[in-house]
Image (tube, rainbow, N blue to C red):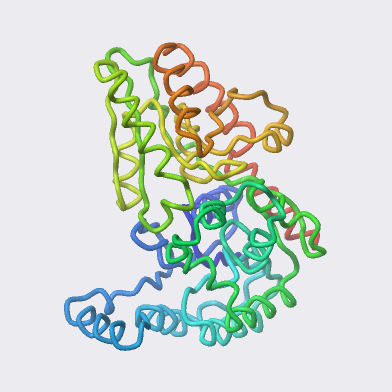
């Protein structure tokens, strides 16, 4: 049985691929590496000419004159030359409605080829797409990445990549994928809640985490408690990073002798992992119901993570508040209070970290999750 995974977000498809391979399946992953994170792919469509010295020179000129980024075309061209290798797969999963990340018309053309040349095709909802953005704009759920935009329209430029999914050109892509795929799988509560009543919704399958390659790195602090904040400048507003930054300013003044703060910005995945390994506490995001991929991997390592852990998440997994993670809120005083509690009671860091590790083992084991995907793919 052959499986094709198109696109990558935060290592999700890589971990799913590893789980499927452990079960004996042949899996091919095609992606651009998720930008600067540089995740591995079997066939990479990452632009190279556009980022070369000469290519980038012409790319910048074109962008200044037309506001069009040529690297999108290069990505599409690279995918086009792979089409002959992307035929005859039993199952295909798209990480997003536009997994190739080229222009809308080119994306539609390429996806039509993929759909024609393969069998069962499924859509994964684990990031922004038309249905999600539409639901969030209609305020179907009270907490989302659009909250900063609702509160301050001046940040609209930071949401350009989000609102692209509401453009007419993209709707054609959405409509084709929606009508021709066999259904939609969601990866966590932030996508399940807006999608659960959609007729094409199939199942919530938690993110797969390859626990076999993650070493437990959280230990009871012997000297200073290390707090880590990783920043992606392109989605920092959507994640509420400013609240973490303000909270850390207060915490540093309050507990300077007891803590060490590490802040990293826009770094590749492998470097990111090596930097946060020494941390006891990781600050992830403030506007989510559930954990994103970075949070889950840190939890697997036994770290205390400030992330989404709302009551809907707790109910889904039959958990208590602060049991496996700290529910982060866009509230500086609240964040300071929670951080202070951990710094003053370091045994809580060990307790929550152990709970987090056990939770990932139970609910996110990559082989168990791969089996869940296979069950859904086979039954539809």
The image quadrant where one finds the C terminus is: bottom right
Residue that sits furthest to the left in the current view: 53
Would residue 242 appear left or right of 290 to someone viewing this image? left
Would residue 348 appear left or right of 255 to someone viewing this image? right
The residue lying toward the viewer, choosing from 366 and 316, is 316
Residue 1 position by quadrant? bottom right
The residue lying toward the viewer, choosing from 6 and 155, is 155
Q: Residue at x 73, y 33 (%)?
A: 315
Residue 301 position by quadrant? top left
Residue 313 in the image: state x and y as whole percent.
67, 37
**How many numbered markers are drawn?**
0
Q: Residue at x 75, y 53 (%)?
A: 203
Relative height, residue 343 to residue 194 (above, below)? above
Residue 374 in the image: state x and y as whole percent.
70, 55
Q: Residue at x 38, y 25 (%)?
A: 280
The residue lying toward the viewer, choosing from 108 and 286, is 286
Residue 52 position by quadrant? bottom left
Residue 35 in the image: state x and y as whole percent.
37, 63
Residue 369 in the image: state x and y as whole percent.
64, 45
């Amino acid at each position: 049985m052959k499986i094709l995974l198109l696109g990558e977000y935060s290592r999700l498809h890589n971990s799913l691929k590893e789980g499927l391979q452990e079960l004996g399946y042949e899996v091919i992953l095609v992606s651009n590496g998720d930008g600067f994170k540089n995740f591995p792919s079997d066939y990479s469509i990452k632009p190279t000419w556009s980022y070369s010295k000469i290519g980038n020179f012409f790319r910048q000129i074109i962008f200044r004159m037309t506001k069009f980024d040529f690297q999108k075309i290069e990505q599409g061209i690279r995918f086009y030359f792979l089409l002959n290798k992307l035929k005859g797969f039993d199952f295909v999963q798209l990480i997003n409605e536009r997994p190739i990340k080229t222009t809308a018309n080119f994306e539609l053309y390429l996806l039509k080829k993929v759909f024609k040349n393969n069998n069962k095709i499924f859509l994964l909802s684990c990031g922004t797409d038309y249905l999600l953005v539409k639901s969030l704009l209609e305020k179907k759920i009270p907490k989302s990445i659009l909250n900063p935009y609702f509160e301050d329209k001046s940040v609209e430029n930071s949401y350009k990549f989000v609102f692209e999914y509401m453009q007419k050109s993209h709707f054609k892509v959405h409509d084709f994928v929606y009508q021709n795929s066999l259904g939609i799988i969601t990866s966590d509560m932030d996508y399940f809640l807006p999608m659960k009543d959609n007729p094409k919704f199939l199942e919530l399958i938690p993110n797969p985490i390859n626990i076999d390659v993650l070493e437990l790195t959280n230990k009871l602090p012997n000297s200073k408690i290390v707090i880590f904040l990783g920043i992606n400048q392109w989605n920092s507003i959507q994640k509420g990073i400013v609240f973490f930054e303000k909270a850390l300013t207060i915490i540093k003044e309050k507990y300077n002798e007891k803590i060490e703060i590490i802040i990293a910005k826009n770094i590749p995945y492998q470097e990111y992992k090596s930097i946060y390994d020494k941390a006891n506490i990781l600050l992830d995001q403030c506007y989510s119901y559930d954990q994103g991929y970075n949070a889950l991997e840190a939890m697997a390592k036994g770290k205390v993570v400030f992330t989404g852990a709302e009551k809907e998440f707790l109910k889904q997994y039959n958990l208590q508040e602060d049991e496996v993670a700290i529910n982060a809120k866009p509230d500086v005083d609240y964040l300071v209070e929670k951080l202070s509690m951990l710094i003053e009671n370091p045994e809580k860091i060990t307790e929550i970290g152990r709970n987090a590790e056990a939770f990932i083992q139970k609910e996110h084991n990559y082989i168990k999750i791969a089996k869940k995907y296979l069950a859904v793919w086979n039954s539809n």
